[in-house]
Image (cartoon, rainbow, N blue to C red):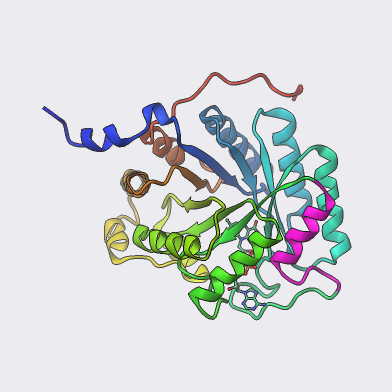
Amino acid sequence: MMGVGDERASRLPDAGSGLKISFEFFPPKTAAMEEKLWHSIKRLAPLSPSFVSVTYGAGGSTRERTHATVSRILKETPLDPAAHLTCVAATRDEVDGVVRGYGEVGVRHIVALRGDPVGGAGCAYAPHPGGYADSPALISGIRALGDFEVSVAAYPEKHPDSPSKEADIEMLKRKVDAGADRAITQFFFDNDSFEAYLERVRAAGITIPVVPGIVPVHDFNRIARFASNCGAAVPDWLAQRFEGLDKDPSTRQLIAAAVAAEQVLDLVDRGISDFHFYTMNRADLVYAICHLLGMRPVKPAAKKAAA
Ligand code: FAD
């Protein structure tokens, strides 16, 4: 007799084969945060992500820390790091200097972003005088500086600055024309809206991979705040699942794992095989979700260089 879930399991590729995963981290501010980040990197590395990315703080505030984290990943692990980079609060020369710095240490993948306005999401965006005007300009600039792989951001539920869904797709097309290799989406919870977005993207003749960004809901209230800033819908069913659990972190963790696993397994059912996880520098939920996807640790490869 088939057990519950056997039918779905039979549709999953064997032991995760055919699935691609990547992880996003943010650069740590303190020694304790650094320890937590490296614990997470070491826990997730054996799952063989195709790359791991490190964010760039708003307004370029983590320029050195992003560089240091990416360089350490490159030096001490077998992982391929991608460095996020924005156009905000920097001249073109300054941004080019950051790109050259990555080239010099061997980083070959950049996540190229316009970034949020200096005043924060919701304020009007104004390019820095002498800086890159927008994300397509940044992508062209990176391409001119070397043989970098370039990933960009995409917004299944529309970026808040975008006047329409069509304008958003048009911007993605400009990014692809400028040389983007892959789009990673803002997080979302409504798989139907992602599928509809993907149809619009393909109808516009955009053929690069569009990788869904998955956020495990460690803290519902925090994620709901992020979502309202970045234009991601928080469905009622999601709020209901976390209702009454504010003071019950262990149950919240179980629900969060179930919610994210349900989302990724549904996307697998819809033919998606590439996932980018917003880890928030925590390994626990992401590891569990990847396990459910059939990913298993492989023997750690030798370090590239002594730590
Ligand atoms: P774009 O895609 O260039 O623009 C966003 C949208 O705004 C467009 O789709 C377009 O519709 C509209 N728009 C932009 N310019 C114009 C214009 N001139 N006229 C009309 N419409 C316009 N932020 C950070 O600070 N650091 C990070 O490390 C970081 N990493 C991210 C990673 C991912 C995968 C994602 C999805 C987002 C990330 N962000 C990060 C957030 C991002 O910086 C913000 O969403 C920012 O507001 C937009 O940057 P973008 O590159 O997506 O912009």
The C terminus appears in which quarter of the rendering?
top right
Tell me if 54 is positioned left or right of 226 in this view: right
Tell me if 55 is positioned left or right of 277 in this view: right
Residue 131 visible to an observer of this rendering: yes
**Pick the front one: 147 or 155:** 147
Question: Could you tell me residue 188's position as x and y percent?
Answer: 43, 59
- Where is 130 relative to 195, above or below? below
Tell me if 154 is positioned left or right of 255 in this view: right
Q: Quadrant of ligand 1?
A: bottom right
- Where is 222 relative to 273, above or below? below
The N terminus appears in which quarter of the rendering?
top left
Q: Residue at x 47, y 52 (%)?
A: 212
The prevailing secondary structure element of the residues shown in magenta is helix
- Where is 45 relative to 185, above or below? above
Residue 283 visible to an observer of this rendering: no
Q: Is residue 141 magenta?
A: yes
Picture quadrant of residue 193: bottom left
Question: Could you tell me residue 8's position as x and y percent?
Answer: 26, 38
Range covered by the magenta-colored residues: 130-146
Q: Residue at x 84, y 76 (%)?
A: 129
Question: Could you tell me residue 63's position as x and y percent?
Answer: 77, 54
Tell me if 125 is positioned left or right of 39 in this view: right
Question: Could you tell me residue 16's position as x and y percent?
Answer: 42, 31
Q: How many marks are shown on the rendered structure? A: 0
**Pick the front one: 134 or 116:** 134
Q: Is residue 104 magenta?
A: no
